[in-house]
């Protein structure tokens, strides 16, 4: 029956987690805590915790085997019906168009990250595991801002951020600044996350303030 979790409305039995095209689908059934009967609810969720109602039905104890079969079929039907989008090619084209439209002198790394070094800086160059302080502004290619730090920046370890930052910040030295154009594969993947739609290209203006 899967792992069992306590929930405010009763007991939740987690049936399956399946990752398809970078999206985590979570299917579970909520059961009344007093009796093994009630209302079955299947949700399709992603790694950001957002859930969308997938199916709902009533059942009795004797229906459990039938319900389990329905849920297993629902898992595979939903995953097989997902629209398959080639975000790698889509992001590549979107980034190239953005570079051309904004007349940027960008370089492409082997990973698919594009970056613009406006000022390299004169201090220490970080490694992929360095603690750094970075001031940044993040937006989509339509210039809509989704995140921005204060002028003094934030401090973090480069091993604990998205891959585009882990790699991209190392192209600067302390005091340097520029742009990172991050495809979804090096950002948040194909899953919606904190207001960022799955498959999005992310543009970051960055300034490397300090390297510890």
Image (cartoon, rainbow, N blue to C red):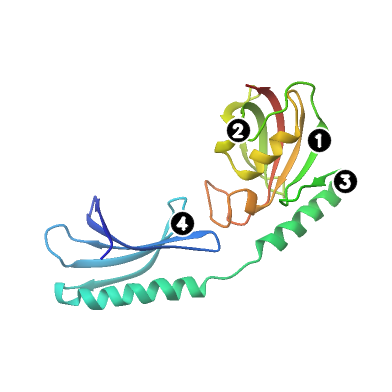
Q: Nearer the viewer, residue 103 or 122?
A: 122
Number of dots carrying numbers = 4
Secondary element at image label 2: loop
In the displayed structure image, the side of residue 67 where residue 120 appears, left or right:
right
The mark that comes first in sequence, 3 or 2, is 3
What residue is pinned by disc 2? 129
Q: Which residue is mark 3?
A: 103
Q: Residue shown at 68%/29% (left/top)?
A: 126
x 53%, y 53%: residue: 192
Question: What is the spatial separation of the Cα atoms under label 1 and label 2, in whole angstroms?
Answer: 21 Å
CB under 8 Å between callouts 4 and 1?
no
Of mark 4 and mark 1, the one earlier in the sequence is 4
Q: Dot 4: within a 10 Å radius of its alpha carbon, few (fewer than 14), some, or many (20 or more) residues? A: many
> How far apart, in angstroms, are the residues tagged by discs 3 and 1?
14 Å
Disc 2 crowd, CA 10 A, few/some/many (<14, 14-19, 20+): few
Disc 3/disc 2 C-alpha distance (Å): 32 Å
Residue extending farthest to the left is 34
Between tags 3 and 2, which lies in front?
A: 2
Residue 189, picture quadrant: bottom right
In front: label 1 or label 2: 2
Nearer-N-terminus badge (1/2): 1
Residue in view at x 16 percent, y 67 percent: 37
SS at badge 1: strand
| Sequence-earlier tag: 4 or 2 | 4
- Is 172 displayed left or right of 134 in the figure? right
Marks 3 and 4, how far apart in space? 36 Å
Residue that numbered label 4 is attached to: 46
- Vertical relation: 33 (above or below) 79: above
- Marks 3,4: beta carbons within 8 A: no
Residue 117: mark:
1
């Amino acid at each position: 029956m899967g792992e069992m979790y306590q929930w405010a409305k009763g007991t939740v039995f987690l049936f399956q987690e399946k990752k398809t095209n970078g999206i985590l689908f979570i299917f579970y059934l909520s059961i009344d805590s007093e009796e093994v009967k009630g209302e079955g609810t299947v949700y399709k969720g992603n790694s950001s915790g957002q859930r969308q109602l997938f199916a709902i039905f009533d059942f009795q104890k004797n229906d459990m085997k039938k319900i389990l079969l329905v849920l297993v079929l629902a898992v595979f039907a939903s995953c097989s019906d997902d629209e398959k989008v080639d975000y790698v090619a889509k992001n590549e084209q979107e980034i190239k168009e953005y570079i051309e439209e904004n007349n940027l002198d960008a370089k492409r790394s082997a990973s698919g990250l594009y970056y613009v070094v406006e000022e390299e800086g004169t201090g220490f160059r970080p490694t992929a595991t360095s603690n750094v302080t970075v001031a940044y502004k993040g937006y989509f290619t339509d210039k809509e801002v989704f995140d921005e730090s204060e002028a003094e920046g934030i401090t973090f370890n480069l091993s604990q951020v998205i891959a585009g930052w882990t790699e991209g910040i190392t192209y600067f030295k302390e005091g340097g600044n520029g742009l990172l154009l991050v495809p979804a594969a090096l950002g948040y993947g194909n899953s919606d996350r904190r207001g960022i739609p799955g498959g999005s290209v992310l543009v970051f203006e960055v300034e490397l303030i300090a390297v510890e």
